[in-house]
Structure formats: C-alpha cells, structure tokens
Amino acid sequence: MENFGIVLAVLGAVLAALLAGAGSAVGVGRAGEAAAGVVTEDPSKFSKVLILQLLPGTQGIYGLLIAFLCLSQIGIIGGTFVELSVAKGLLYFLACMPMAIVGYWSALKQSRASVACIGLIAKRPDQLGKAILFPAMVETYAIFALLISILSIFGIAGLPV
C-alpha cells in the first residue's frame, strides 16, 4: 500500500496512452480501408485520401505525450523518483483521464468523419480543403482534452497534497 500513489499515477499514464492509441489505431484502420477503396479506383487520389486517413492518428500521439509528461513528473522517466501520496497519485490519474477518454472517443468519431470525406474526395477531388475541415472539427475536442491534461499534470506538482 505504500506505493499506491505511484501505482495510480502510472495507471493514469498507461490509460492515456492505451485508450487514445487504441482509438487512433481503429480510426486510422477504418479510414485506411476507405482510402484503399478510392485508390483502387483512382491511384492519383492517394495523397489526398492519405491526409484524411492520418487525421484520426493524432489522438494516439497526444495520449503518448500525456503519458510521457506524467511519467516524467513522477520520476519514472528521468531517474528522479518521487514518493507520492495516494491523494497525489489519484490526482495524476485523474489528470490523465481527459486525454484517455476524449482521445479514445474522438479518434473513433474523427475516423467516421474522415471516411465520409474520403468518399467526398472520391467524387469531388477538388474539395480537399473542405473535406479536411470536417474531421478537423472533431480534432478540436482532442486538443481541448490534451490541454486540460497538460495543465492538470503541471499543476499537481506544486500542490501540498
């Protein structure tokens, strides 16, 4: 029980990377299937649909960033191991949850928007700029979650808990 604070903090970091990464993997895969169908019919559209396929992958990067920041703050990365109370460990766990949960769901939803826009590019390749905007709007919420997690992780270090 003496290391339960560290366990909670590491669990939060793991879930941020795991859930955001899993959502991105499913999302990029789903969009890749649609993109491959378009490229089968018209290989010249490869670069346009590739951009749309990659968009759901950013949440995995954000989740990995949050995991690194959390692990760095608690000393797992960097070699300066910090003793954590259960309360502080729980705070780190909770700080990672916005990125874990929103990262997972937004990657899945962004992939649906990307798939639809890949269909748009199949019929109207001149509309790439507009097609990028639809999945990019979903990205906004992943960025909000990333910001909240970052601000929370850095805010915890100064707390007297």
Image (spheres, rainbow, N blue to C red):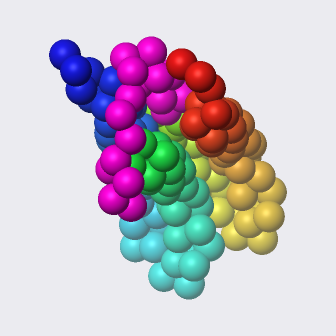
**Relative to 34, residue 155 above or below:** above
Q: Tell which of 25 and 15 is nearer to you.
A: 15
Q: Indicate left or right for 28 with 119 as reference.
A: left
Q: Position of residue 120 (x, y in %)?
A: 66, 55
Q: Indicate left or right for 47 with 96 as reference.
A: right
Q: Indicate left or right for 3 with 127 as reference.
A: left
Q: Position of residue 160 (x, y in %)?
A: 59, 22
Q: Tell which of 11 and 89 is nearer to you.
A: 89
Q: Magenta span covers which residues?
A: 76-97
Image quadrant containing the C terminus: top right
Image quadrant containing the N terminus: top left
Q: Quadrant of residue 8?
A: top left
Q: Position of residue 30 (x, y in %)?
A: 39, 49
Residue 141 visible in the shown view? no
Question: What is the residue that sits farthest to the left in this orientation?
Answer: 1
Query: Residue placed at 46% from the left, 63% from the top?
Result: 35
Q: Position of residue 100 (x, y in %)?
A: 46, 33
Q: Tell which of 121 and 114 is nearer to you.
A: 114
Q: Quadrant of residue 86?
A: top left
Residue 61 visible in the shown view? yes
**Relative to 50, residue 7 above or below:** above
Q: Is residue 81 magenta?
A: yes
Query: Residue placed at 53% from the left, 35% from the top?
Result: 99
Query: Residue placed at 48% from the left, 82% from the top?
Result: 43
Q: Is residue 102 magenta?
A: no
Q: Tell which of 78 and 13 is nearer to you.
A: 78
Q: Indicate left or right for 18 with 44 as reference.
A: left
Query: Residue placed at 40% from the left, 73% from the top?
Result: 40
